[in-house]
Image: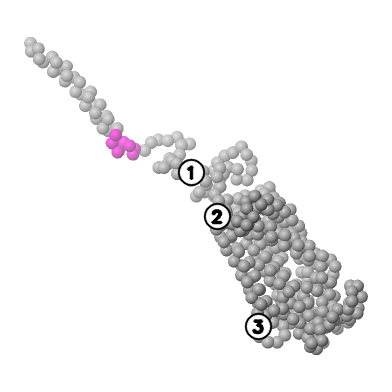
Amino acid sequence: MNHQAFPQCHLLRWIPPVLLLLAVMLFAGSPALAQAPQKLSPDAVSMEDPGSELWRQIRQRGTSEPVGTSQVRSVESGVLINDLGERWAEFRMQELKHWGKYPLLLVIVILVVFYLLRGRVDIEGGLSGRMLHRFTHYERALHWVMASIFLFLGVTGLILLFGRSSLIPVFGKEVFSILASLSKEGHNLFGPLFAVSVVLMFFQFVRRNIYAKGDLSWLLKGGGFIGKGHVTGGFFNMGEKTWYWIFILVGAAVSISGMILLFPNFGQGRVIMGLSHVVHGIGSIVLMTIAIGHMYLGSIGSEGSLEAMKTGYVDYNWAAAHHDRWARECKDNNAVISPEQFAALIGEEPPRVSTGKPAVEVKS
């Protein structure tokens, strides 16, 4: 018997298991096995990049309805993270805050340049001293209450929108934080009162702001600044009527959107809240831009205009220049009062009457 054969046979018995083990190891590490599909449970999430795909689903990107579940029963409570607020913040900081200041600055520059070049628009013939009753006590009180609330909301709104970048360098962070907090609380408090004033203004003045024959010629002549000849107007001219309807419609949009933002407990979701932010911001800037022009024309820009909201009466020559159809009606109805009668009504001395030019007469 060959004693060398025994160890060789003993070693040969281990060759097949070793080869099998190597084969299994090589096969298990092959790409084919690594890419083989795995059978997942119905609740499992199949994804190539678990982190990014999970984050995408959490933020609801690509879906319109919430897919999560929550014990909280409220609007969109199943949405863990909603990026609509982030998009609104970007719009507010990058678009609204950047572009919103230009209309306000532009109208101020235009009015300053116009006043320096043209000056006050005086009444042809000067003041006559004869007066016409134009607004009642209630109408003037309503106008001044609405105007005061509007100015307060405009100033506080501008502080909240532009104050961080414009006021912090001047007053510092501590003072601005107090000012911003007061502006926010005041804005929320007086906002509903503005909505009430818009409704009252609509019902009080809507009948006299219906467009009528002759208003288009006022528009084509730019209120008298384009071409020659007199521009005709009724109790309110075309420009005043247009401002009225802009105030009512845009003011209603600003009021409704403000209510949605102030009372977020009527079932409105993030989409409605975001759209309300956009409408409220843009609408407020539109109103403030046009209101600056309205305040200019109603005060230092036009002779005799402010008297209507101070005493409720206007000079006859002013009415003939800006509202000739209404002045004609007053004259035909013997509604023109003398300077002495007007002074007695308001308890003052008779007003000074300009004698530089003859008084304007309106043809009957």
Above or below residue 9? Residue 310 is below
Of circles 2 and 1, the one toward us is: 2
Identify the residue shown where x is 42% and y is 35%.
Answer: 40
The magenta region covers: 29-36
Q: Say which quarter of the image contains residue 205.
A: bottom right
Residue picked out by circle 3: 226
- Crowdedness near tag 2: few (<14), some (14–19) or many (≥20) residues, C-alpha within 10 Å: few
Q: Is residue 35 rendered magenta in the image?
A: yes
Q: Which mark is residue 172?
A: none
Left or right: 234 in relation to 55: right
Q: Say which quarter of the image contains residue 52.
A: top left
Question: Percent from the top left, x then y, of residue 139?
Answer: 82, 67
Disc 1 to disc 3, C-alpha distance:
61 Å
- Between discs 1 and 3, the one toward the N terminus: 1
Left or right: 211 in relation to 56: right
* Disc 3 + disc 2, Cβ < 8 Å: no
Residue picked out by circle 1: 55
Question: Percent from the top left, x then y, of residue 336?
Answer: 87, 81
Of circles 1 and 3, the one toward us is: 3
- SS assignment at label 3: loop
- SS assignment at label 2: helix
Question: Percent from the top left, x then y, of residue 293?
Answer: 68, 71
- Between discs 2 and 1, the one toward the N terminus: 1
Identify the residue shown where x is 80% and y is 64%.
Answer: 142
Q: 208 or 150: which is nearer to us?
A: 150
- Between discs 3 and 2, the one toward the N terminus: 2
Mark 3 residue type: Ile
Q: 108 or 236: which is nearer to us?
A: 108
